[in-house]
Image: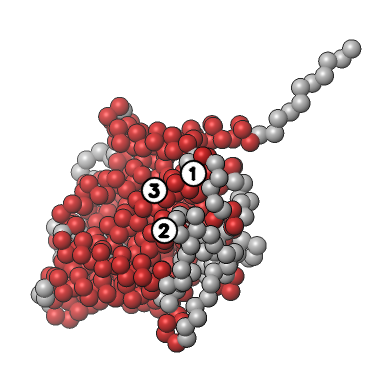
Amino acid sequence: MAESPTTASEPTSSGILGEVETVGVQPVPDDQRTMSPGKMTIVWLMASASATTPLIGALLFHFGVTDMILAIILSWLIGLIPSGLFSEMGREVPLTALIVARKSYGTAGAFLFSLLFTFVNMGWFGLNTAVAGVTLSAITHVSGSLWFWVIGVIQVVLVLFGMKWLEYFYRYTSVVLLVCYGVLAYLLFSHYHVRMPAATVPMQWGTAISTIVTFSILAWTYKVSTVSRFARPASDAHGKKAFFFAPSVGIMVSVLVMGLMGMYSQQATGNWNLALLGAHAPIWGVIAAVGVALAIIHTNAMNLYPSTVDLLVALNTFRRPSQWEQPIATIAMGVLGTVLAILGILNHVAGFLDVIGDVIIPFTFIMLVDWLWVQRRQTPVAAFFAQPRTGHDWWSWPAVIAFAAGLIVCIWGGDWLPGLFTTVLPLPVIGGLFSALIYAGWAIPRLMPKTAAPQSEG
């Protein structure tokens, strides 16, 4: 069983190699925990502003713009507390969520989830790279395979330098991204007949909110602590509320703005992908290409980075961390994700997306119950790297059973009460809450102090 020191080893190389991030799964040293709430908001604003985010506008097009906005606001309210708690988790213990999950699910359970989420994030990386390649190929009339590799290499190089340089990149390219998509929006409204999309079918709140939360905020939530471990520690009370709100605000503002763009583009042109407007004019094409490339790189960096860290968590189950394993894993995962894009992951996206929310949301909600009421936010960092000694250390069966119960609800709940989960309640959220309640019902009574029996008078 691998062990970890209480602080990460520092790179011994100088120059550009000295800037490569090698912290891996180890606790982030205090001198690297400097991210402010504003910087965190920008990170999540840009990570959520993918070139595929406007697809939400097409998926909800038949519900109309007013109900889509309301559904996005409700989705933000649902995801606000989970994402805020994970933000605080990373500030309280500077570790990635899958390391903390060792106490929630046991070391073996966390290992399996680490492998699963490694490939989920790599799948997202391949999916977004494929969208970028197809879109840039249409805009520039250059082979898509070339763009796959160009985008893939840029993303890998960026992630090699870790969260410090990712934050710089997000901050200083955010204005460029906003300008590019602002110009594309101007092109849409000035060259096409645009009108407010109206509802064509009765609103189905359960379906709409399920689409949004699994596409955005609750799909991102467990990754929030992977970023917030680089934020100012929880002992620094300054800006605590801002740190709590920063991830959800950044994620959902992007969803709202890009969703509106996608819906209006769908209405005016018949295609949600606003960037394709640049395919018919050289200057517009350059602007669109830059915007799409930045949007993809922003989002995919936050897919490749957690994919690498999750893989390292799985490896750390059996071996001691080494200094250069993070950059090696980044390169390997980036190449594999790019190959998936070239092999046509876009042709299999429907089934891939269906699985994500069913797994991630129950996993996330159980972790929060365990962190708040079982660990009580007090587990020392070293305990997460201690060698398992009992069966419970390897497998937390109550958590595993609660997760399985929630997963069953997520997959088959719609067959039991289809009307309820279509028109009223978001099924993945209900499945996650069901998991959390089962786990809480087992764990919390066992942690309550036992009161002595009253003595009879006599």
Q: Disc 1 marks which residue? A: 394
Residue located 49% across and 78% down the image: 11
What label does residue 112 carry, if any? 3
Q: Earlier in the sequence, mark 3 or mark 1?
A: 3
Identify the residue at horizontal 59%, vertical 46% (top origin). 375
Left or right, 321 with respect to 267, comes to right
Is 327 placed above or below 409 here? below
**Circle 3: element type:** helix
Name the residue beneath numbered marker 2.
Answer: 315
Mark 3 Cα within 10 Å, few/some/many (few <14, many 20+)? Answer: some
Screen quadrant of the C terminus: top right
What amino acid type should be assigned to the residue bearing mark 3?
A: Leu
The x, y position of residue 311, in whole percent, is 38, 59
Q: Position of residue 124 (x, y in %)?
A: 29, 58
- Kind of residue sitting beneath label 1: Trp
Residue 228 visible in the shown view = no
Check contact, mark 3 vs mark 2: CB within 8 A. no
Query: x, y (%) of residue 158?
Result: 36, 75
Distance from the alpha carbon under mark 2 to that under mark 1 = 15 Å
Q: Along the line of sight, which residue is nearer the eye, 176 or 163? A: 163
Relative vertical location of residue 376 with respect to residue 8 in this rendering, above or below: above
Instruction: Give 173 or 348, whichever is nearer the viewer.
Output: 348
